[in-house]
Amino acid sequence: MCPEGYQYDSKQETIVTEWDLVCSRSGLGPMTQMFVTIGQGVGALLFPPISDRYGRKPVLTFSLVMCTLTSVAAGFAPGYIIYSILRFAFGAVQQGFILTAQVYITELFPKEQRGTVSGCGGLGWSFTMVLLSLWGYLMRNTSWRYIHLFLGLFGVPCLFTYWIVDESLRWLIANKRADEAKTLVQKIAKFNRVDFNDILPPLQKDSDIDPHLMHQNHKEEKRENILTIARHKILLKTAFIMAFTWMTNAMTFFGLTLNSAKLAGNRFLNLFLYQVVEIFAMMMFLFIINRLKRRHVSMLFHGIAGVSLVLSALLGSFKGFSDHFTTASVALSFVGKFGISASFSTIFLYTPELFPTNLRNIGIGIASSAGRIGGLLAPFSALLTDYVEWGPGVVFGGCCIAVTVLQHFLPESSGREMPQTVHELKAWKRDKTTVIR
């Protein structure tokens, strides 16, 4: 409440000043980010099953177009309600794009290159976030509408995705769409100037196929839906561990980013440095992802994040005794940011490798939905800091350490072709050998 009214120190063109989101309406400003996060949770549950059933390409192209349109439209929003609806919609379609794109890219490249390609994608994200933090500083006195329009227009080239992107070959094969798969392989062979017959051997004749095996495969194909995860212990265990992992990563990653303004020093500089740390994290990820097993890489980065954040929180509680404690606490916070940034790239690669083709998007969708819960919890870490200064660091670090322990029970995917069916995934337990490339 503002019984004596209110007056802005500077009439910057933000949604807060334009729509007077102050006093009794002050909570509406932060809620816009909450609408995005809720939308991401809805999108993470809605789009993956559609992608697994109808293909990667239609979901990918639809989501890209809608991301562009909702972002641009938000720049013209006439009021808070319309703006919030558009932000919710953006969050939903953004997850449709990100999750489908990650699965698509994972299925597009051979096992020897998946880690490198995923790391390059993470490096692109990190450079973009560095530029975005600089752009935010330069545009701090510019209307929020121009910022939305500028960012939305970056998606215009994506409107042509439908005519550029082909369907996932793995998805076509897993769903018995042989004619489309053959056409796509012919296109790939022509582009690479190789003989089509050397790539795809002639298909078996129907008379050569065991009818009992066909019936068995048909039954397994029918079973492959979201309920399959609950019926198979290996899938249920994997889904639970990865859901907790994603929740921890999102809570820690966004919690650290939001709390960067509370660190000693300039808040714009701290945010910029946090993003620069991500670049070094991605470079480390690229260096070791093909040298170590996936599970070990993930455990390593979560362990680094967990230990450094707990130590940062504990040292920060002694900052009144010496400035050295403050310096060490901030430094360890950046180490924690390094670890959680690298671990995020690892689980983006590792998660889709742990599920069969017709459950791959559903699996990463379940994990990402849990991540949205972590994203919703992240803003409350700032409130916890006001009461228990060391609380957020201990919670973030403790959860990361718990993830490090839990991931010991996950299957290893390094050097393996991604499973097409649940049967292939279960065969991993019998074959303990892995190849690190």
Image: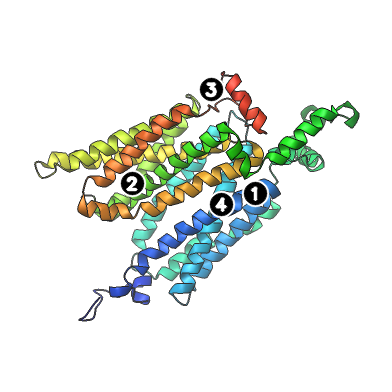
Q: Amino acid at mark 3?
A: Ile
Disc number placed over residue 436 in the picture, else none:
3
Pick whichever of labels 4 and 3 is earlier in the sequence: 4
Q: Nearer the viewer, mark 3 or mark 1?
A: 1
From the top left corner, tell me how far across and down residue 7 is, in percent: 24, 78
Q: Is residue 201 visible?
A: no
Structural distance between the alpha carbons of marks 1 and 4: 11 Å
Query: In the image as oriented, which residue stretches furthest toward the front?
Result: 231
Structural distance between the alpha carbons of marks 4 and 2: 30 Å
Q: Is residue 326 visible?
A: yes
Q: Residues within 10 Å of mark 1 (few under 14, many from 20)?
A: many
Structural distance between the alpha carbons of marks 4 and 3: 33 Å
Pick whichever of labels 1 and 4 is earlier in the sequence: 4
Q: Which residue is mark 1?
A: 51
What sort of colour scheme is used for the picture?
A: rainbow
Q: Which is nearer the eye, 345 or 267?
A: 345
Disc number placed over residue 45 in the picture, else none:
4
